[in-house]
Amino acid sequence: MLLFRDEEHVERWCATREMRCGALLGADQAWQLAKGWYGSKLRPDWRRHTLAEAESLFASIGLTGDFWKLRG
């Protein structure tokens, strides 16, 4: 994960490296994603998220669009 000041900063960073820009998310979204993804990892009954569960988590915190689609 890389932290940037704003979208313009991201665009400059990508342009200087001739890279395509990926998905952007704010600090709050990153925190919500981390809690949803790792929140139950230490429980004895933990299991991996299914693709549908992962996509549902992404959508619940506003991460939408092609980048966040895991299924064809």
Image (tube, helix red, strand yellow):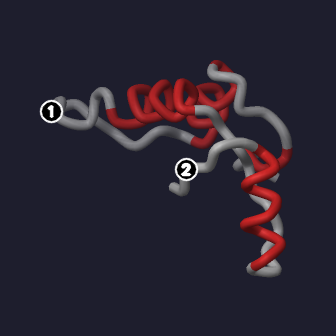
Q: Which residue is mark 2?
A: 3
Q: How many marks?
A: 2
| Viewer-closest of 42 and 33 | 33
Left or right: where 16 falls relative to 37? right
Above or below for 49 versus 9: above
x and y percentages locating residue 1 in the rendered image: 51, 55
- Residue 51: percent from left, percent from top: 61, 42
Identify the residue shown where x is 62% and y is 49%.
4
Badge nearest the viewer, 1 or 2: 2
- Label 1 sits on a secondary structure element that is loop
Task: Residue 49 in the image: state x and y as whole percent.
Answer: 47, 39
Determine which quarter of the picture holds residue 12.
Answer: bottom right
Q: How many residues crowd mark 2 within 10 Å: few (<14), some (14–19), many (20+)?
A: few
Q: Secondary structure at mark 2?
A: loop
Residue at 64% in and 31% down: 58
In whole angstroms, how far apart are the C-alphas of marks 1 and 2?
A: 33 Å
Q: Residue at label 1?
A: 44
10 up-or-down from 15: above or below: above
Q: Nearer the viewer, residue 3 or 53?
A: 3
> In percent of the image, x 44 and y 27: which residue is there?
36
Q: Is residue 30 left or right of residue 35?
A: right
Which residue is drawn at the image coordinates 62% and 33% (left, top)?
26
Which three-letter amino acid code belongs to the residue tagged 2?
Leu
